[in-house]
Amino acid sequence: MLFAQTDRTGVGSVPLVLMVSFFLGLTMALLTGYQLEKFGTERLVPTLIAIAFTRELGPLLTGIVLAARIGAAYTAELGTMQVSEEVEAIEAMGIGPLRFLVAPRLVAIASLMPCLSVLSCVAAFVGSALISWATLNLVPAFYFDAIMTSLIISDIVIGLFKAMFFGLLIGLIACYQGLTVTGGAEGVGRATTDSVVVSITTVIGFDTLFNIMVTKITG
Amino acid sequence: MSETPLVHLDNIMLRFGEKTVLDGINLKVFGKDRLVILGQSGGGKSTMLRLILGILKPTSGVVRYRHLQVQRLSRSKLNLLRSRIGMVYQYSALISSMTVRENLALPVEELGRSSKKEIDRLVKQNLAIVGMSGTEGNMPAELSGGMRKRVSLARALMMEPELILFDEPSAGLDPVISSVIDELIISLTEKTNTTSVIVTHEMESAFRIATRMAMLYQGKIIEDGTPDRFRASDNPVVHQFVTGTTEGPIMETPAHADSAK
């Protein structure tokens, strides 16, 4: 069960996370590059992209993608199981639905979010490096060297922690919405929509809160 | 009957908000009974099964399983008790994302200590009992309603339960398949000495299966006895239900039933 969830949550989400992050990294580098070029500071693009994605956009973007792709699937699956009495049947067999249905999903999404977030950052770096090479004449060797020197360990740790926390939030919201479905097929549809909306809003809300707290603590 | 009942619903009252579903139910299920609970649709029959399993808790009264008070059991003890009770749902409730083999193996894998070889043997044996050999690799969606019900019964047998609860076993099935399911219930309970509680409102099926019958009407057990006693009952509600006539005290809608209360 855990392996199946891990495979679907993690491996299945890799192409989408890579693609979305690649294009977002590329667009960010393009737009910031044009602005910074006016002041002759386009060499700051890799630093900006590195910090923005490692601390902020990598976990956030991965969270949004997983809320839409995996959170919705969790809610729809558990919701359908709930309305067709499958959840009750599991309970009636003496198997705890939380242990059997919820725990593997939570473990899968919380443990794989950091991995996917790292992949998201790498894809964004590649996308931004390519566009910077093409439009700003920043060669990839310089670009990646600038990324490596600009990142400090706390940026990476904060990003990974956020990713894991977001994964846990998405999993909890999705499973809760699924297991509390009432009202048949319409109820499943409503719960799935709610799951995605609430997950994305909560992730963005907690991200903001987290940033305020970290900024206050670290000065 | 002085023997200790396997299940005892003792003065059970169950309310959902303002609505009283069960109103002082007293019912004992003894070992080897094939007790059929009759009653109108939406009258609380399936709810009684959920009370026995501890999925629902009564508003007042006590649900006893042998000497245990079901609603007072800890989560782990309740799960242990549930593993000794098999439940066959109205719509089978097979896990749709799992094959027939995985569905049957699930309770043993999760609760038992059996090896894969032993589980395979049990799966084959129980599928053979219900006449579904060779369907191990099928998904539930590939099976007909009757086949799903038989697989559901095979799943209920996997933990060798002492009590099997059937929720509308012949609902939605054609008369032939319905009879096959009824015969299966009779032969299984006789062969394995299992006690069963069957909830239904289909009279033909009920009289075929039952060694004892109870009728639930407006939240109360209004008749409890042998099938012969039911056939000869002079209670107008029981008589109307058994004969299926439109003339009589049974109201069609729950609203009528509520107002009649």
Image (cartoon, helix red, strand yellow):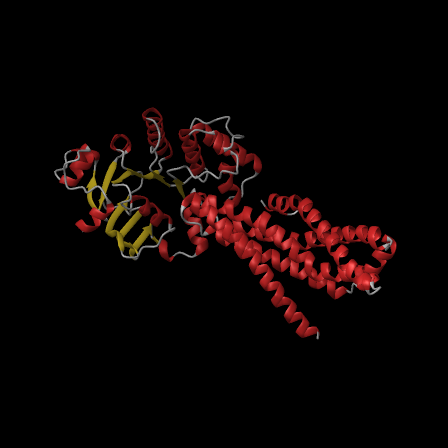
Instruction: Tell me which corner region of the image, top left, top right, bottom left or bottom right, holds residue B167.
Output: top left
Q: Position of residue A43 (x, y in %)?
A: 84, 61
Above or below for B65 versus A34: above
Residue A44 appears anywhere in the view? no
Give the residue displayed 21% in from the left and 34% down from the top: B227
B99 or A22, nearer to the observer: A22
Quarter holding the C terminus of chain A? bottom right
Q: In this view, which residue lies farthest toward the front? A: A38
Q: In this view, which residue lies farthest toward the top? A: B176
**A98 relative to B18 in the view: left or right:** right
**A45 relative to A210 in the view: left or right:** right
A23 or A193, nearer to the observer: A23
Above or below for A19 versus B231: below
Above or below for B27 versus B105: below
Give the residue displayed 18% in from the left and 32% down from the top: B243
Q: Position of residue A193 (x, y in %)?
A: 51, 50
